[in-house]
Amino acid sequence: MKRIEIMPYALIVAETNPLHYGHTYLIQRAKESGYGVVVLMSASFTQRGLPVVTDKFTRANDLVKNGADVVITHPVQSATSGGEYFSRGAMAVASRLPFIDAVFCGTEFGDRATFDAIYRYEKTEAFHSRLKAAMESGTSYAAAYKEALEAEDKSWPSVFQSNALLAYGYYKSLKQLAPMIPLVMVERAQDGEKICSASAIRTMNDPYQIKHFCAGSPPQYKESELVESLYRFYRGLWLSSPPDLTSFAGYEIGLDKRIRACLREAKTYDEFTELVKTRRYSRWRIARLMLHASLGLDKASIEAAMAQQHTFQVLAFSDEGKNYLRKAKDSSVTLLTNFKQVKKCSLDERRFLAFEEKATDLWSVLTSGDMGRDFRGF
């Protein structure tokens, strides 16, 4: 029997909504460093609780065409969560996948020494007292956290640039879950005529401009239209049969009444977010809370998946990725390449995957797409 050689692999966490040249630059840097690349990709909804603009299989195939070897679904439990849950969930997967020798991420700010200093500071009484004082003033956790950092070092709030904050989240989670896996921080590619953020691409209307900035397939749907469809779904659900929010991450007493009142008043999603957000409740915190409540994805289910899930969906793979998947069969994780395989999973693993199915079905409703399921029998 031919021996299967396995190379070291780097994990990259990405939404690719859509794939752009910043993503491909990061893949290229990992490849140049001698790694195969496993991408942990958000499937149907993003960290902000909004639907993706292109189906997950198309985006996964785009990644493989641009150098990724294996694309695995980032479980919806953490992929649609904020802050520490997002980072911790992704790094929990990194700690369980076999042959992961590094995590690569792009960042605008930060180095190991800076992150070490912030990490140590977070363990001090000074940090906790400053954080508590800021929270008691009525501000959001994110703003209070930023204020507590600035009180110690005025340069540290720079970590609140989007990718830098994720990088620090990955760094902290790896320290706790898998200290043997290094975080490789790559300065984000800022220059070049083709570098443009995914959020900017999603607002473009000119197909030639979109094609220029996309490294893969152009968006299949307009984000604004998907969001309005989601908002109509929320209004129908929450005004007729409002869910009990007490067990969901991000809930505080009175927030449910505020959401319902704003749903009655606002006719569009943009109007709703302007009405419902406050100094304490960001629009994205509320968006995530509403998505999770609609999926039945409570805080306990999120924490259980991060602590225990060992079965993940493979969306695409290269020829080199086949070697990875063959060797992975001897590991403690199960990587599903066919939905029929789910019938062999334990009941607990099937429950974890059931949330992915719910999210996929909701995305299919919003896009009026095929309701064919990835996993059957739940």
Image (cartoon, rainbow, N blue to C red):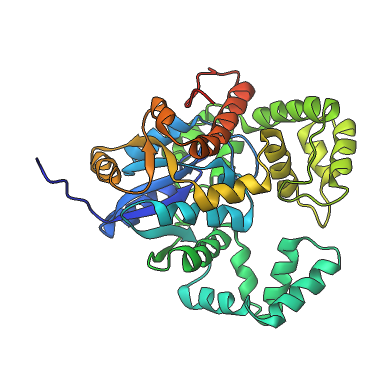
Q: Is residue 150 above or below residue 101?
A: below
Q: How many marks?
A: 0
Q: Quadrant of residue 229?
A: top right
Relative to 23, say whether 355 is above or below: above
Name the spot of residue 351 as percent of width and height, x first: 55, 36
Say which residue appears at 81% left-offset and 31% top-offset. 238
Residue in the picture at 51% in, 47% down: 196
Query: In front here: 248 or 131?
Result: 248
Instruction: Give the side of residue 84 with respect to residue 63, left or right.
Output: right
Task: Work out whether residue 238 or residue 110 is closer to the camera in this orientation and state it.
Answer: 238
Compare residues 137 and 244 and report the one nearer the observer. 244
Query: What residue lies at 25% left-to-right and 58% top-to-bottom?
Result: 34
In x, y percent, where is residue 67?
31, 44
Left or right of 71, for residue 287: right
Where residue 358 appears, x then y in whole percent? 59, 30
Query: Is 267 drawn above or below residue 280 in the view shown?
Result: above
- Which residue is most to the front? 347
Report the quarter where the C terminus lies.
Answer: top right
Which x, y percent locates residue 207? 51, 29
Q: Between residues 265 and 237, which one lies in front from this camera angle?
A: 237
Q: Residue at x 79, y 24 (%)?
A: 236
Residue 311 visible in the snapshot: yes
